[in-house]
Image (spheres, helix red, strand yellow):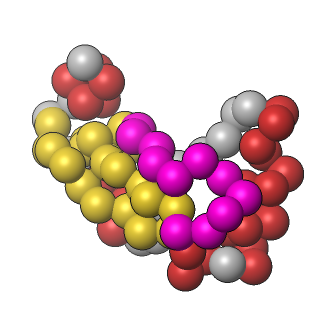
């Protein structure tokens, strides 16, 4: 499995505009935009993902052979 570092840009007004994370390439290519563990943003994020998925654009920045390499 290949891993990547990705950038998600949010074009709405309710959440922070940018998020950088790491995941498997397969998840990103299937529409994954990241996840939120912050209590402050979690409910808003879930609602925006459900109702306004088109406001999230995710691009792969770099590819890696292991998850550890992607995190570093």
Foreground residue among 48 and 13: 13
Q: Answer with the quarter of the image where residue 57 lies.
A: bottom left
Q: Residue at x 20, y 49 (%)?
A: 61
Q: Residue at x 55, y 81 (%)?
A: 54
Please, what is the dominant secondary structure of the magenta stretch? loop
Q: Is residue 43 above or below residue 55?
A: above
Q: Using residue 64 as the reference point, say whether residue 36 is left or right of it.
A: right
Residue stretch in magenta: 11-21
Going 44% across and 59% down the picture, which residue do you hit? Answer: 9
Asked if the magenta segment contains residue 48, the reply would be no
In percent of width and height, residue 71 lies at 31, 24
Q: Is residue 62 left or right of residue 6?
A: left
Quadrant, the C terminus: top left
Q: Where residue 63 appears, x then y in whole percent?
A: 15, 44
Instruction: Give coordinates of residue 30: x percent, y percent.
Output: 42, 70
Residue 27 in view = no
Q: Is residue 12 magenta?
A: yes
Res 5 → quadrant: top left
Q: With 42 as the anchor, is 5 left or right in this view?
A: left
* Picture quadrant of residue 65: top left
Q: Residue furthest front?
A: 13
Q: How many marks?
A: 0
The reply to whether residue 37 is in sight is yes
Residue drawn at x 72%, y 68% as measured from the top left: 48
15 w.r.t. 70: above or below: below
Where residue 66 sits: x, y (%)? 22, 30
């Amino acid at each position: 499995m290949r891993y990547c570092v990705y950038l998600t840009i949010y074009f709405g007004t309710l959440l922070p505009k940018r998020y950088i994370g790491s995941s498997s390439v397969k998840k990103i290519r299937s529409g994954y935009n990241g996840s939120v563990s912050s209590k402050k943003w979690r409910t808003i994020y879930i609602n925006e993902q459900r109702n306004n998925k088109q406001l999230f654009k995710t691009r792969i920045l770099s590819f890696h052979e292991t998850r550890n390499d992607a995190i570093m």
